[in-house]
Image (cartoon, rainbow, N blue to C red):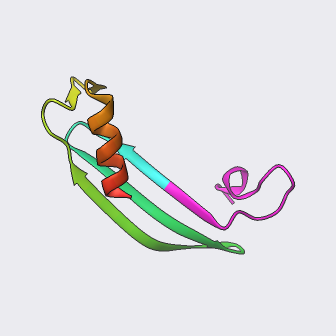
Amino acid sequence: MVFDRFLTRADNSASECLVGLDIGTEYVKALLARVNGEEIEIIGVGRKHQDRSDMHSGAIADIAAVVRNCEDAL
């Protein structure tokens, strides 16, 4: 399985949840998933629009604002 290295901990027990976070210039997008054996169940998604001053040319310009946007998306 392509996600095997993400689904196991150092003690080889299965992880319970996964979080995906995409920090883009326009939006922060988040995905929350639960791992059930070999299956991954999507249990939540979120999106928060970034202000123009938060990002500049694909780089973070205001880290505090981007962190708040990530928290809101999650």
Tell me where residue 24 appears, x and y as whole percent.
29, 40
In the rendered structure, which segment of residues is drawn in magenta? 1-19
Let me know if residue 10 is in the magenta part. yes
Q: Residue furthest right?
A: 11
Identity of the residue drawn at 38% across and 56% down? 30
Tell me where residue 69 appears, x and y as whole percent.
29, 47
- Quarter-wise, where is residue 2 in the image? bottom right
Identity of the residue drawn at 47% across and 64% down? 32
15 vs 56: above or below: below
Identity of the residue drawn at 71% across and 56% down? 4
| 50 displayed left or right of 41 | left
Tell me where residue 10 appears, x and y as whole percent.
83, 49
| 33 displayed left or right of 56 | right
Q: How many marks?
A: 0
- Quarter-wise, where is residue 14 in the image? bottom right
Q: Main secondary structure of the magenta part?
A: loop
**In the foreground, 14 or 72:** 72
Let me know if residue 61 is in the magenta part. no
57 vs 7: above or below: above
Tell me where residue 11 appears, x and y as whole percent.
87, 54
Q: Quadrant of the N terminus?
A: bottom right
Identity of the residue drawn at 51% across and 57% down? 19
Q: Quadrant of the C terminus?
A: bottom left
| 71 displayed left or right of 51 | right
Q: Residue furthest left?
A: 52
